Image (cartoon, rainbow, N blue to C red):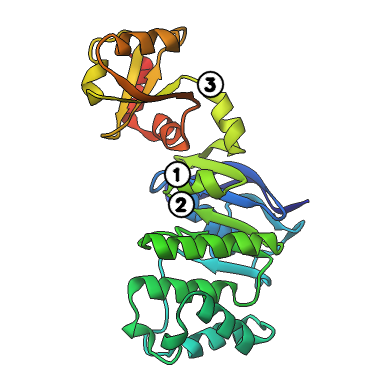
Amino acid sequence: MNTIEINNVTKSFNKHTAVDDLSLSVPKGSIYGFIGPNGSGKTTTIRMIMNILYPDRGTIKLYGTEHLGSKLDNVGYLPEERGLYKKMKVKEILRFHGELKNAENIKKEIEFWLKRFDLTEWANKKVETLSKGMSQKVQFIATIIDKPEIIIIDEPFSGLDPVNTEVIRSAVLELQSAGSTVIFSTHDMGMAEKMCDFIFMIHKGKKVLDGTLSAIQDKYGTDTIRIQTENGKAAFKDIPGIVKINDYGQMQEIRVAPGIDNQDILSRVLSKTRITKFEITKPSLHDIFIRIASPEEKEVQHA
């Protein structure tokens, strides 16, 4: 069963088409990652799901029903533009959000999540006294305080340190295990790879990817070598058959041309320097994103 069905949706602002004939199905209980460059249409799509914006054409259904103009029950939404009442105390603002959503056992839920996110000692502090990371955790709690069936979060890990990122990541996975369907928009390709059951990419308003990571990678083949050498990037100079080098300092990711034997590339590199590590693999989601979205990539592909 699909929790969300988007069918042939288009949304324009003046002469700019932000979302162009988009269709998408989000299965119940899945984590669905939305990726795409800034201005690609991700947030517009999310706002249409949330009834903040309405499509010019097409339909959006939650559990098989359109909800245009109506309050969305059992949907938690954490927008990219964070906002909390700064003069309110943490516990007060969480109670306020819980009551708005008719949450059950509000006091118990607030205490649980404050303890879980290491915020108990801040419960009676005003929001304005919190750090950015603490504020984001409070807003996350406010989003899920009523245990919504659908959770939509826009850039949930933006600006968080590794510890707080792990806290939010773990909480999202637990909510999914409890039955929630999760959509999150992110620029963190590594996190999308690790967490998402399905990945959807929108570029210039059009859907360009939609499926499991494995299916998306299969589409792009096994043209990638991740390799570490004693000479770094210099080891690949003047070696034919290399289309592109992504240089990560200690490791280089090499894309080879169609028809080129990966073993031939490795032999040529080995004749110039010592290889300390290599892996023939499918392209990463990061690399696929760049292939689709980068103007420089278009030049490489048409060279």
Q: CA distance from mark 3 to mark 1?
A: 18 Å
Q: Is residue 281 above or below residue 147?
A: above
Mark 2 vs 3, N-terminal side: 2
Of helix, strand and loop, which one carries label 3? loop
**The label number, if any, that marks residue 186 in the structure image:** 2
State the CA–CA distance, disc 2 to disc 3.
Answer: 24 Å
Residue type for callout 1: Met
Q: Is residue 22 above or below residue 78?
A: above
Q: CA distance from mark 2 to mark 1?
A: 7 Å
| Residue type, numbered disc 3 | Gly
Q: Residue at x 52, y 60 (%)?
A: 169
The kind of secondary structure element at disc 1 is helix
Q: What amino acid is at disc 2?
A: Thr
- Vertical relation: 26 (above or below) 168: above
Tag of residue 295: none
Which circle, 2 or 1, is nearer the viewer? 1
State the count of labels: 3
Comparing marks 2 and 3, which lies closer to the viewer? 3
Nearer the N terminus, badge 3 or badge 1?
1
Q: Are marks 2 and 1 in contact (CB under 8 Å)?
A: yes
For label 2, the crowd category at 10 Å Cα-Cα, with few meaning under 14, some 14 to 19 and many 20 or more, is: many
Q: Please indicate whether residue 48 sits to the left or right of residue 160 in the image.
A: right
Disc 2 is placed on an element classified as loop
Q: Is residue 8 left or right of residue 246?
A: right
**Residue that mark 1 sits on:** 189
Residue where numbered disc 3 is placed: 221
